[in-house]
């Protein structure tokens, strides 16, 4: 931790926690790089998601190592991990769990017993979430927002930390169901997992086609430490001007707002809510810590705006007909919205 960073931190306890955070980040990145080639930006997005206490949607073609990435991350974090393969016949109770009647053999007395579903874990991989109908997709809503599950009127609290990392194939592929807007809004990020470049693909071939076993991924943190880091993130200061900048960025995505750009007005049907603003600020605070700073700068907000907003801004028919993507619209918007000192 640099002297400049240390000067901005008040108590010795916070200073020590910041140092532990930055050490843990370095160790986690190294462990993941031992298995995953490239995708450093995606890895950082997943780490930001965890320390904010949110959830992440990972969009990518089959075979881009989405499942391997999430499993490796959970192992490096020292957290429990479960995976759900979403299919068209998956039922909501296959996710949340269900009550079953059990009989005590000695007394003959019958009683209900709750059987936990795979959602009771720290890191939940919702694999190909858009392969299952909306009714089953919605079974995750309460868990993602409230960190609880309700079955037969009984409320069951999930362990902390809890993070859903959902993968999906591009919507235009056959046999997929678009995610409901209410569920999309629960995801902090929509991260695009793209193809590797040629040199990185050569490295993958070299790493995974030999008889030599890969070294095991070592845990770098604990659940208790991660909860402390989540609290630390919220203590990172942000100036009033940058808070207003975050508000302006999100308001500019709304076609009816005075800040909306010409592209937003022409190509967007709906913009983002205040949940996006809160997520943007929290993610910027986390990025600042991961970059070795104890304060937010405008670059933190700009760097995170597109993956936070791309699933919250709904393009219209004109965007599709003109070949304009949501990333094009948001990138244009960011060039127009400035920080007011």
Image (tube, rainbow, N blue to C red):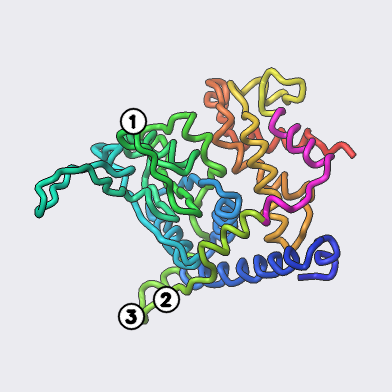
Give me the C-alpha separation between circle 2 and circle 3.
Answer: 15 Å
x, y percentage for residue 76? 49, 67
| Count of numbered circles on the image | 3
Question: On the picture, is 98 further left or further right than 189?
Answer: left
* Residue 264 against residue 25 in the figure, above or below: above
Disc 1, SS: helix
Q: Viewer-proximal residue, 300 or 136?
A: 136
x 65%, y 65%: residue: 21
Name the residue that disc number 2 marks: 216
Name the residue that disc number 1 marks: 135
x 45%, y 53%: residue: 159
x, y percentage for residue 31? 52, 71
* Residue 64 against residue 302 in the figure, above or below: below
x 59%, y 33%: residue: 326
Disc 3, SS: loop
Disc 2, SS: loop
Question: On the picture, is 179 further left or further right than 340?
Answer: left
Start and end of the magenta stretch?
232-251
Name the residue that disc number 3 marks: 211
Give me the C-alpha separation between circle 3 and circle 1.
Answer: 44 Å
Visible residue check, residue 174: no
Judged by its main secondary structure, the magenta piece is helix
- Say whether residue 234 is magenta: yes
- Say whether residue 123 is magenta: no
């Amino acid at each position: 931790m640099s002297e400049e960073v240390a000067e901005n931190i008040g108590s010795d306890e916070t200073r020590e926690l910041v140092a532990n955070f930055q050490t843990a980040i370095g160790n986690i990145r190294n462990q993941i790089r031992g298995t995953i080639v490239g995708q450093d930006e995606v890895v950082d997005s997943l780490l930001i998601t965890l320390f904010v206490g949110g959830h992440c949607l990972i969009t990518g073609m089959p075979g881009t190592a989405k499942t391997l990435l999430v499993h490796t991350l959970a192992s490096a974090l020292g957290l429990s991990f479960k995976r759900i393969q979403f299919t068209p016949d998956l039922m909501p109770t296959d996710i949340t769990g269900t009550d079953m009647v059990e009989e005590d053999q000695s007394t003959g007395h019958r009683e209900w017993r709750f059987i936990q579903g795979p959602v009771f874990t720290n890191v939940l991989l919702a694999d190909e979430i858009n392969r299952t109908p909306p009714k089953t997709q919605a079974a995750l809503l309460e868990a993602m927002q409230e960190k609880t599950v309700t079955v037969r009127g009984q409320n069951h609290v999930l362990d902390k930390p809890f993070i859903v990392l959902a993968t999906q194939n591009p919507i235009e592929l056959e046999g997929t169901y678009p995610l409901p807007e209410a569920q999309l809004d629960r995801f902090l990020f929509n991260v695009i997992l793209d193809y590797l470049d040629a040199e990185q693909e050569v490295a993958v071939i070299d790493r995974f086609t030999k008889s030599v076993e890969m070294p095991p991924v070592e845990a770098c943190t604990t659940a208790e430490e991660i909860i402390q880091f989540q609290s630390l993130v919220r203590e990172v200061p942000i100036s009033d001007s940058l808070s207003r900048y975050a508000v302006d960025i999100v308001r500019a995505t709304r076609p009816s707002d005075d800040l909306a750009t010409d592209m937003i007005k022409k190509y967007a049907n709906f913009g983002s809510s205040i949940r996006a603003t809160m997520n943007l600020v929290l993610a910027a605070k986390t990025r600042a810590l991961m970059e070795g700073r104890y304060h937010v700068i405008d670059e933190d907000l700009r760097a995170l705006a597109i993956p936070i907003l791309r699933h919250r801004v709904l393009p219209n028919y004109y965007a599709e007909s003109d070949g304009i993507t949501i990333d094009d619209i948001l990138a244009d918007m960011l060039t127009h919205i400035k920080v007011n000192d």
